[in-house]
Amino acid sequence: MGFFGALYTGAAGMLAQERSTSNTSENIANVTTVGYKRKDTAFHDLVSTNKSSTSSHNTVYTTQVNRISQQGPVQQTASVSDIAITGNGFFTVRDSITNPDSEFLYTRNGSFSADNQGILRNTAGYALYGWSVDNNGAVASGPGTASLVPVDVDILATSSVPTSAASLYLNLDANEVPYNPHQFSTVSNLPASGEAAHFARGIEVFDSNGTSRILNVEFRSVVGPMAHFSSLTTADTGGMERSESMVDNPTSATPAITDGDILQISDGSNTLDVTFRNGAVNASLNEANTVQDMLNRINNFQAPDGSNPFTATLDSRNQLLVQANDPTVTLDVGGSSANVLSATGLNLIPDPDVPSDYTYEPEADLLTDGTANPTQSTFPAFSDSSSPNPFHWWEVRITINDPATPNDSTNQVEISKGLINFNGDGSANMVTDANGQALIDLGTIDFDSSDASEATAITLDIGRTTQVGGSYDVIQEDQNGAGLGSFQDYALTDEGFVEAIFSNGQRLNIYKIPLANFANPDGLERVSGTAFAESADSGAVTINDVQTGGVGSIGAARIENSNVDVADEFSMLIVSQRAYGLNSRVITAVDEMTEQAAQLKR
């Protein structure tokens, strides 16, 4: 290599260091630029293809190395519209949302704010793109950019959420005296809804238009739906005393019962004959003298399988109440003489369906709808439907204002009614789901007959209701709806959602921010504004939800700073400066040597 080859090599070395210094200075200039990715300079020797050992010479050239895939430090901010990526991925942006020819670009600059049209743009002016989310929370996702739309936080000026689920958890008074429809002034079967509710609660819900409505939930303690019979309370007969004799006692409630009279109770499979005696009794023969004797004979009677088919009690008015323990059987009651069942005997109330008959059928099939509770199948199923507790039954009735006069609370319309039951320990005899919920399906409720658009489907959860103690106590009341509210603000979440915040306290997901990814992100083409364009070197873009498809996570109220290390850059600057000087000395030396060579002719 001659003088001129050495001269060219020195010049190439200076040019290479100049380019390195240019990249270093650009890195230092952008040390505080959000999302900036530094450039490095790679040096390569350039070998002449001339194979002559006497004339070949080498030189140097440089290439730019992008460090786009290298993570920058993440910094906490006070802005709810800032987001940062940790790991792989880019935000998808565009310069224009109206120009169809505007290409999609990709950036790590997550410092966004809404412009005067509500479009989220970062500090470089690029509009953020994401997946839309509908009112049911469904995300319109897709693997390519065709699924993306500009993020417009002003898309909803107002919003409401119709109630789809409500819950009422309370304790019911275990000492409440149950209604026995047989003893109503007009003898009937269930329901007991014509009587005053023992406890009632109004739950505010919201229809599809965001209008506030009230669900009235009434609770009535009732004698269970199993077949049962009762004695009648009147001013003449009074109640029974447990210790008084029932036989040949003119002052008792049963003056016509005589020694040897028999009360027969049958459920079709088991028959009990209670024989009344005036004096000592033999329990093994099912004999009874006092009221307590009769109760004991009924309660202690066993079927061949060892079960107790009947339960007998005196109610709060000291009237006889006998219930079948099997909810499916019918009770047939008879007496050896007319005196046993008559007004001067046990004074039993005939079957409400057939006033001259003493055959009593179950008042409702626990597994299906019945006359007494036509919507029982929409209530929680019973955990134990074959042998439920014969006591602790409640009728639940749910009403709303008459849809014809929706603003008049004095005129209520029933939308659902059914029975619930509690175990002996006060826990609910209900089948619950994995979340402990036991739902009453109220169906689609039309609150206003003049406006069909407000109809709303609602379920009511009563799964944590109990019956213990001696008082009513509302433990929790809740619902998932919200009335009409105006848009107030927006926020970005760690899950990548864009939330709209309304004056009614509602926070509604309106967009989901996915992340773009490339096979070789360092091969992206740089464009102004810390953005990058797809290139042949980068590979085609794929759009993925956060933390799927190889992309990282999103952090709200954070930004990713430049990945420039100032110490490294200044070290490189010093090296470039020294190398530049050394290459310049080569040119100076060659200049002096050529000058000396020129002087040889003098």
Image (tube, helix red, strand yellow):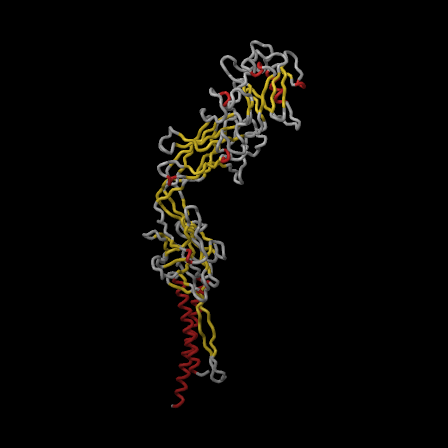
Q: Nearer the viewer, residue 294 or 355?
A: 355
Residue placed furthest toward the bottom: 602
Residue placed furthest toward the top: 250
Query: Horizontal and vertical percent for residue 262?
Result: 62, 16
Q: Nearer the viewer, residue 255 or 491?
A: 255
Quarter holding the C terminus is bottom left
Query: Horizontal and vertical percent for residue 87?
Result: 48, 57
Q: Nearer the viewer, residue 504 or 256?
A: 256
Taking the image as drawn, is residue 199 in sight? yes
In the rendered view, tell whether residue 309 sits above or below residue 335.
Answer: below
- Residue at image position (45%, 66%) is 537
Taking the image as drawn, is residue 74 in sight? no
Residue placed furthest toward the left: 116
Query: Horizontal and vertical percent for residue 392?
Result: 53, 27
In the rendered view, tell whether residue 6 sits above or below residue 347.
Answer: below
Q: How many marks?
A: 0
- Residue at image position (33%, 53%) is 115
Query: Horizontal and vertical percent for residue 293?
Result: 62, 17
